[in-house]
Image (cartoon, coloured by chain):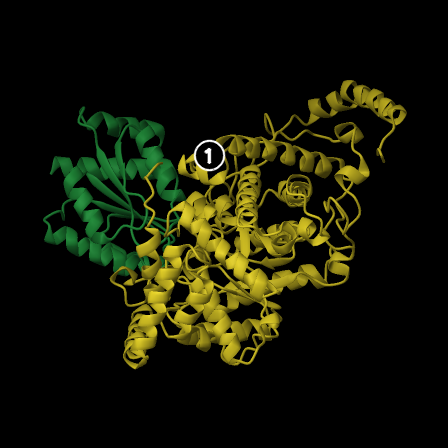
Chain colours: A green, B yellow
Amino acid sequence: MGGATDILELLKKSKGRRIKVLVAKLGLDGHDRGAKVVARALKDAGLEVIYTGIRQTPEQVVETAIQEDVDVIGVSILSGAHIPLMKKLMELLREKGLDDVPVLLGGTIPIPDIPKLKELGIRNIFLPGTSLKEIIKETLEAALERREE
Amino acid sequence: MARLFNEETLKIIEERLKKWEKETLPKSLSKYPLRQDSFRTHSNIEVKGVYTPLDIRNMDYFEKLGLPGEYPFTRGIHATMYRGRIWTMRMFSGYGSAEDTNKRLKFLIEHGETGLSLAFDFPTLVGIDADDPMASGEVGVCGVSVSSIEDMEIIFDGINMGEITTNMTINPPAPVLLAMYVATAEKQGVPYDRIGGTTQNDPLKEFIAQKSYVFPPEPAVKLAMDVVEWSVRNLPKWNPISISGYHIREAGSTAVQELAFTIANGIEYVRHLINRGMDVDEFAPRLSFFFDSHINFFEEIAKFRAARRMWAKIMKEWFNAKKERSLWLRFHTQTAGVSLTAQQPYNNIIRTTIEALAAVLGGTQSLHTNALDEPFRVPSEFAAKLALRTQQIIAFETGVADTVDPLAGSYYVEWLTDKIEEEAWKYIDRIEMMGGMIEAVKRGYPQREITDASFRFQKEVEEGRRYIVGVNIFVEEEDEEIRNVPLLDINQKEIEMRQRERLRRLRERRDKARWERSLKNLKRAAEKGENVMPYILQAVKSYATLGEIMSTLKEVYGIWVEPPIY
């Protein structure tokens, strides 16, 4: 778990160019509490946040990611449909040449599904109870690694 | 007038309390300093170390409490409460296909469940068919998939719809699901006056919290009130609306906000129905409510008691209701899904037990207890049974159901009940000033209040000002439970394929002319602003699907897109 100092170090590394994150609610579920709390925490940490609102299709999320030229995509799903939806999203990202954009996922994810999601290329899976600090830290690290490449 | 304490007694207590604060308390404090700077409820109400008659010094017994079954119903809507009849044990269930859910319902009935409650999948909740491209991957996952009356018939195969009552957690498509339910009961030979149950049908909280909205606020309310009007006149045992705080709370509100926004929604509906020309006593007895029971034990009990008192007062004084039943706030409770943790999931059994106990001490009419595995998926059979057994133990072993409102007269509980009521009125006043809840929702007022509260709560957890066992205290790095908890297996792909196939056959087989006519008639009725319920019933009987009926209504009413605020 990252403390506040880790986060500050990471923010310094972004060298003035603000890190831009897309927070997306994928699928039909309306459980937006987590997505909103995370979006606000990322914004408070100094990141630029685009929040899609609910009921987004994989196509819409990819479209927004392209238009907004984001560093990281954070997805929230609490419907249980994470595997088919994330599979579709990752396929589309590859098709559009965005496979270098790190994707993070949060929600009600059963443990046995985690290896399958990792296989799809999802960088982090945040279970219920994950601290905001950890999410901020992982988001920053993901963005900075991509920039270094 | 029946003042509880006379001035002389209060004076003596006041003097003794001063002495206690000067002598007894400091001695104890020097030995055991307070473990926190302040103690606060979920609603951020500061809790003192001790409560005395001084905290409820002006309380008039009949004004604030009354006897059970009497105005203002603080102590309960019935004189006997659970001494006469235990609350309805109504487990929210549904997953997969209609066949899977039929099996689960029978399992729960066999183990002593006394009412049914259907959980629908997301495509059904937002009114699209299982073969809609948007439904892909979500069919049957977090509830049962219902696209036509055929699914409803299978769900209730072998279950007597004249004997058991059913709650349906459904909102924009509520008229369609109710029509399917009624048509299925009719096929079973059940007369209308024996069809009992509830449609959630509460559109305002969809914009505020649950977010399965479809239509914009005005037509959404109009449609919901069509269901109320039609049900009141045709289904005497049906609760056509369940004005719900549950989702407001789960979205992150405080207990006070949950109470205030729910009551404010109720006020908006009552006004709408009166403006339709209905008599308040015709519909008010059929209004029902639904609350969350969270983990902050006494605050929840106080909230339930305050809710009854507030609603009775509103119906009597604002809307001039005459019938006693019109003043009753009858409610269903669900323990707080959001209080459950993925970490050390077996701890969830204990959380649910405490929350269920609060609901019972608060006088609920029916109760759902969450299963321990719900942070991951819809419950397994084992977990669902354990959750039901939790209620049965409370009902039949503990003795808490043996007397009515046992916490009445507790200085703390009465003070907190008053305090919560007072705070809730402030919100209601603000919403009234805005012109009612429809206006408030359009301005995003309750949405913002909830977002702020949920962020504050999360901050408190992160900063260690609020504890969650297994999350920020007593954390286990090697959590065996989280890895080993058995989960329900749902073959999603197969369910989706079967549902698509069933729909394809239905569309092929049905009488096309009759089907087309039914949808045309529905559209015309919607355009003219008539009550659409009879037309939806015809459409359902003509094998129109859920998605087709909803699309027809969308053409007339339009759709709602929420601005993404966070």
> Which three-letter amino acid code belongs to the residue tagged 1?
Glu
Percent across and percent down for residue A133 are 36, 35
B492 or B136, nearer to the observer:
B136
B416 or B548, nearer to the observer:
B548
Percent across and percent down for residue B403 are 78, 54
On the question of residue B540 being in view, the answer is: yes
Left or right, residue B538 beside residue B67: left
Who's the residue at 60% across and 50% down the image?
A: B355
Q: Is residue B477 above or below residue B146?
A: above
Looking at the image, the residue that sits furthest to the right is B8
Q: Quadrant of the N terminus of chain B?
A: top right
Q: Is residue B321 above or below residue B179?
A: above
Left or right, residue B147 beside residue B475: left
Looking at the image, the residue that sits furthest to the top is B22
B441 or B255, nearer to the observer:
B441
Q: Quadrant of the C terminus of chain B?
A: top left
Left or right, residue B350 beside residue B20: left
How many badges with numbers are in the image? 1
Residue count near mark 1 (Cα–Cα under 10 Å), binned few <14, some 14–19, many ≥20: some
Identify the secondary structure beneath mark 1.
Answer: helix
Q: Which residue is mark 1?
A: B449
Residue B555 image-quadrant placement: bottom left
Q: Is residue A98 above or below residue B140?
A: above
Percent across and percent down for residue B286 are 61, 57
On the question of residue B245 being in view, the answer is: no
Which chain is mark 1 on?
B
Who's the residue at 77% across and 38% down the image?
A: B63
Left or right, residue B162 beside residue B553: right
Percent across and percent down for residue B141 are 37, 64
